[in-house]
Image (cartoon, rainbow, N blue to C red):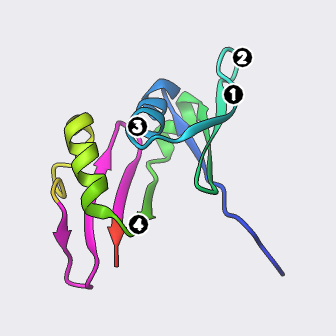
């Protein structure tokens, strides 16, 4: 078997929450959107990464995903995100921290998703 990508689906009660986090804060781009449809969804992209964001109130209540984004420039990302969108910094990991397993990490969250930014 040969796989080339893993593309998660993320469900939001209000898809605009996800757009603020991923597009405004983390600078993903819109690959495809049907935001005005009966069942709003979109595909966001950045550097070969993709995610599907869906507005689905029932599924959003059941799913609270956590993702890791690995980088080689965590300090630069932290500086930019903490200056532009400090409201997304996770209260339990709101600064770049060297973790016991050797990775530097900080975390972001909105009402639905937790994102750990990580550098080994």
* Residue that lies at the very extreme toward the bottom in this rendered image: 101
Measure how far apart labels 3 and 4 are at the Cα level: 17 Å
For this view, does 52 lie left or right of residue 28?
right
**Tags 2 and 4 in contact by the CB under 8 Å rule?**
no
Q: In the picture shown, does residue 65 fall above or below 87?
A: below
> Which circle, 4 or 1, is nearer the viewer?
4
The x and y percentages for residue 7 are 66, 56
Res 104 → quadrant: bottom left
**Residue carrying label 2:** 37
Magenta stretch: includes residue 110: yes
Res 38 → quadrant: top right
**Residue carrying label 1:** 33
**Callout count:** 4
* Residue that lies at the very extreme toward the right in this rendered image: 1
Q: Which mark is residue 71?
A: 4
Measure how far apart labels 1 and 3 are at the Cα level: 16 Å
If the image is split into quadrants, where does the N terminus sit? bottom right
Give the SS element for disc 2: loop
The x and y percentages for residue 6 are 67, 63
Q: Residue at x 55, y 32 (%)?
A: 58
Badge 3 crowding class, 10 Å Cα cut-off, few under 14, some 14 to 19, many 20 or more, is: many
**Residue carrying label 3:** 21
> Which circle, 3 or 4, is nearer the viewer?
4
Q: In the picture shown, does residue 19 fall above or below 50?
A: above
The x and y percentages for residue 42 are 65, 33
Between 57 and 111, the one lying in front of the other is 111
Which of the marked residues, 4 or 1, is nearer the chain's N terminus?
A: 1
Measure how far apart labels 2 and 4 are at the Cα level: 34 Å
The x and y percentages for residue 62 are 50, 44
């Amino acid at each position: 078997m040969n796989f080339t990508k893993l593309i998660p689906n993320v469900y939001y009660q209000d898809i605009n929450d996800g757009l603020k986090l991923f597009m405004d804060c983390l600078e993903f781009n819109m690959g495809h959107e049907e935001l005005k449809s009966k069942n709003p969804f979109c595909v966001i992209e950045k550097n070969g990464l993709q995610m599907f964001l869906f507005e689905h109130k029932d599924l959003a209540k059941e799913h609270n995903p956590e993702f890791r984004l690995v980088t080689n420039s965590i300090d630069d990302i932290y500086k930019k995100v903490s200056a532009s969108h400090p409201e997304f910094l996770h209260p339990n990991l709101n600064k770049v921290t060297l973790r016991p397993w050797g990775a530097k990490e900080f975390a972001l969250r909105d009402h639905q998703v937790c994102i750990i930014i990580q550098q080994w």
